[in-house]
Amino acid sequence: MFNSFGNLFRLTSFGESHGKGIGGVIDGYPSGVRIDLDFIQKELNRRRPGQSAITTDRDEADKVEILSGVFDGKSTGAPIGFIVWNKNQHSKDYAEMKSVYRPSHADYTYSIKYGVRDYRGGGRSSARETIARVVGGALAKIALNQLGITITAYTSQVGHIKLEENYTEYDLRDVEKNMVRCPDPVKAKEMETYIAQVKEEGDTIGGVITCVIEKCPIGLGQPIFGKLHAALSNAMLSINAAKAFEYGEGFKGLKMKGSEQNDIFYNRNGIIETNTNHSGGIQGGISNGQDIYFRVAFKPVPTILMEQHTVNINGEDTTLKARGRHDACVLPRAVPIVEAMAAMTILDYYLLDRTTQL
């Protein structure tokens, strides 16, 4: 059950980093939706390795195959099955890690919990599992597009380099115009240079991804334990390397007084709106019709190409210098994953909201 995500819209994923492939099954997808396969592949291409000089060198086309649930270009209402075959595994690069625990990886906890672990790239704990999420998210985006809901994420911080302005000050159409997926071209260049420098040193760096959901209808979210921001937080923190989540003003709001942070209501031509959006589009756990915006912090990738102290499976001191192909910074490739998880959450909660109305 913990390989599944969602309530009415439900994704179950399977596969390992160095196994035959990564795939999934989606239940609850509405019937009659025109499925754009080119769009799904485009979303996967945004996540795929080897797409730029600042990402891992692993060369995977990540071509998706739809196995079921689509006929004559439309969803049938049946489960949508899909798979992406692994083509470029270098499992031998991980042979020396078979008997040691990589620092800050899932090696130790998986080994203790299950008594066995797939040391080839982390197996099920590898970020390659997120392929299934991106496919599910692409399908969710297609459905949400019919409702006028758009979701855009971007890199807003890499290490000490960050965007200082609110998302409303940037043209989010510029996100895909650079390798790091940052809407500020000047900051993007600084980020790219910094990531390249860190990669050259054999080290890694983390950062923050900001996500904006526009045109979300009022009323999504279920009290008390189904609050929309809690669902988004759960979705985001399930992503590999995600360490923190905040929405609206988040921690910045702690410096504000209630009189400064309150979103005042106004009646504009018969439509009730707020003049500010410090709440981040969610109040009482329910969407209020304003833009939903949040941030997700990602840690530096734990696999570094530098010698580190660790212990082996017998608890003996040893050292490890990782081999293989790894990202120096996950942010550029994590942008479409954040969007995917947001899309699946919003579609799921949209469908849930429809069940509570007559």
Image (cartoon, grey):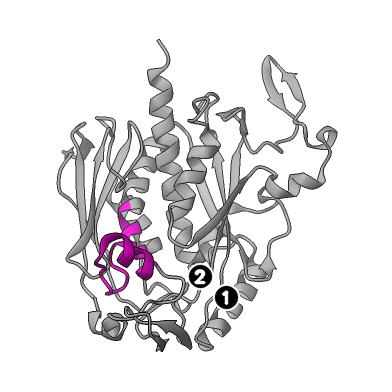
Q: Please, is residue 341 above or below residue 292 in the view? A: below
At 31% from the left edge and 67% from the top edge, which residue is drawn? 111
Label placed on residue 179:
2
Count of numbered circles on the image: 2
Question: In the drawing, does residue 244 fall left or right of residue 108?
Answer: right
Name the spot of residue 312 as percent of width and height, x first.
35, 82
Residue closest to the eye, 307 or 32: 307
Q: Please, is residue 186 above or below residue 172 in the view? A: below
Badge 1 element:
helix
Amino acid beneath label 1: Glu
Res 235 visible: yes
Magenta region, residue range: 106-132
Badge 2 element:
loop
Name the spot of residue 73 as percent of width and height, x first.
21, 40
Label placed on residue 168:
none
Q: Quadrant of the C terminus?
A: top left
Amino acid beneath label 2: Met
Label placed on residue 192:
1
